Amino acid sequence: MIKKNDISDIQSYLSDAANITGNCSFVLFPENTKEIQEIIIDANKNKTPVTISAARTGLTGGCVPNNGILISTEKLNNIISIDNIKKSAIVQAGVLLSELQNNVESKKLFYPPDPTETNATIGGTVATNASGARTFKYGPTRNFIEELEIILPTGELLKIKRGQYFANNFDGTITLSDKKWNLPIPEYDMPNVKHAAGYFCKKNMDLIDLFIGSEGTLGIITNIKLKLLDLPENILSIIIFFEKENDIFSFVKNIKEKSFGELSKIDLREIEFFDENSLNLLKDEFSNIPSNSKGAIWIEQEYTPDVEDEIIEEITETILANNGNEENIWFAMNDKERKNLKHFRHSIPLATNEIISGRNLQKVGTDTAVPDYKFQDFFNYTKNLIIENNLQYVVYGHIGNSHLHFNMLPKDEKEFQLAKKLYGIICAKSVELGGTISAEHGIGKLKTDYLLKMFGEENIKQMAKLKKVFDPNMILNIGNIFDKHFLEKV
Ligand SMILES: Cc1cc2nc3c(=O)[nH]c(=O)nc-3n(C[C@H](O)[C@H](O)[C@H](O)COP(=O)(O)OP(=O)(O)OC[C@H]3O[C@@H](n4cnc5c(N)ncnc54)[C@H](O)[C@@H]3O)c2cc1C
């Protein structure tokens, strides 16, 4: 097993994509389950903290070590099998999402979860229950996980299949050969929105769901069996510009109703939003963005050729009924054209990051989602709050799931502190409206205070109690989701 301890070799393992930084003296690169077991059994015996690091594209410091041992999943990078008949794949945790997608697509199969960052590993996306634009139709990563192999912090190997273990009300029991794990499932209500904050807990839940999105606090995921679908025959991709913001929201409401309705041929897989400030960032590169645009929507739909005309007609009608700019609709019907629209979408976060890194500061971006019927209230509240405080901002994201990223772009340290204060107010508003503080990026070490505010101390204690069943010596991914002192109290 490779061990690196030279600071120049391990420097890049000490921070994540949000530039949250930690420290440790060495990084281990196990190549199989047995090697991980050996590391963890030894660490458990010596009560040495262990942090799991994958592709480090996380944005909340989850993979950043606080001393102890850092285990990288980099060498667990084999696609073990892809089954065309059963439509499933078995992969090691360190396989990159882009690699999986390319492999399954070459076999005419499809893995729908699509966090924007395809350099993430499958293990990382399971640990964070990642999602993306296509979550509108397909839901998050959780929906495509059939089986997990996990090494628990005590070194035991758990293989868990969907449908194998269920909680009885809020009592879960997992039996591993001769050992029984009694799991007190926290009894809080999760918000009824896209949500990736804290443990997934529900009455009578499938216990595999506890591990998905648990941010590496309950065990190290080593192998994963994924559900696949048939690769869609054709995909229609469209960007529509609007001259009034209200027209955008009424368009989204209409097209969502049609998408969920029985009578319409519209069945979108994604609905993405870009505000006026986002479009302004791209005007140099994309001179064809219509002037006077107050925002744009990007939609995609899978289709078979027999209904192509009907779908286009219905979408066009909906665009016109909501005053979309009919002179300037960007249609993409083939792969090359779709890639151009994707490039447009990806250019927005890149342009945003460029501004902020030029200032040597961090952007402060929300990850909140609210119930659909509260979306408009939340949008107006948040936008006005940022404008009243004179901060530069751009808004884009997954409007289909009422989940937008409000990115505040401070110009100096004073504005950065102000943006952080507004961030707390925005999270509180989201929770007040029945939403979540994190819809897809998770809590990591960055947002534990906001999770505490969202769920309250009693519920956080319940989460700590559950973790301690698997991790009695408090060694694994300590500081993720909740602070260590909650573990010490239970
Ligand atoms: C430009 C950009 C765009 C992004 N867009 C999205 C998006 O659209 N949607 C989204 O959901 N996220 C997004 N992210 C965040 C990030 O890509 C996801 O959180 C991703 O799932 C992290 O995967 P990773 O392999 O990089 O994991 P890491 O960042 O290395 O780790 C993330 C967490 O998972 C734990 N972990 C990793 N592997 C394992 C394992 N095998 N077993 C147990 N725990 C493990 C780590 O300890 C850590 O807590 C984006 C990030 C960037 C930089």
Image (cartoon, grey):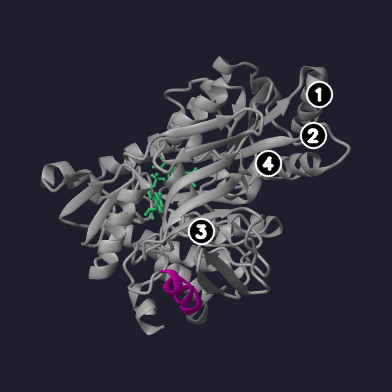
Q: What residue is disc 2 on?
A: 321
Q: For the N terminus, which image quadrant?
A: top left
C-alpha distance separating marks 2 and 3: 45 Å
Q: Is residue 395 visible?
A: no
* Mark 1 residue type: Glu
Q: Is mark 3 within 8 Å of ligand 1?
A: no
Q: Which is in the foreground here, disc 3 or disc 4?
A: 3
Residue 207 is inside the magenta segment = no
**In the depicted structure, whether residue 480 falls above or below residue 125:** below
Residue at position x 39%, y 70% in the image: 471
C-alpha distance separating marks 1 and 3: 44 Å
Of 471 and 118, which appears nearest the observer? 471
The boundaries of the magenta stretch are: 461-470
Give the mark, 2 or 4, whose residue is nearer the N terminus: 4
Q: Residues within 10 Å of mark 2 (few under 14, many from 20)?
A: few
Q: What residue is disc 4 on?
A: 137
Q: Position of residue 245 (x, y in %)?
A: 63, 43
Q: Residue furthest front?
A: 178
Q: Position of residue 446 (x, y in %)?
A: 36, 61
**In the depicted structure, whether residue 48 falls above or below residue 407:** below
* Mark 2 residue type: Ala
C-alpha distance separating marks 1 and 2: 12 Å
Residue at position x 67%, y 24% in the image: 236
Q: Which is in the foreground here, disc 2 or disc 4?
A: 4
Q: What residue is disc 3 on?
A: 211
Give the mark, 2 or 3, whose residue is nearer the N terminus: 3
Give the mark, 1 or 4, whose residue is nearer the N terminus: 4
Q: What residue is disc 1 on?
A: 313
Residue 465 is inside the magenta segment = yes
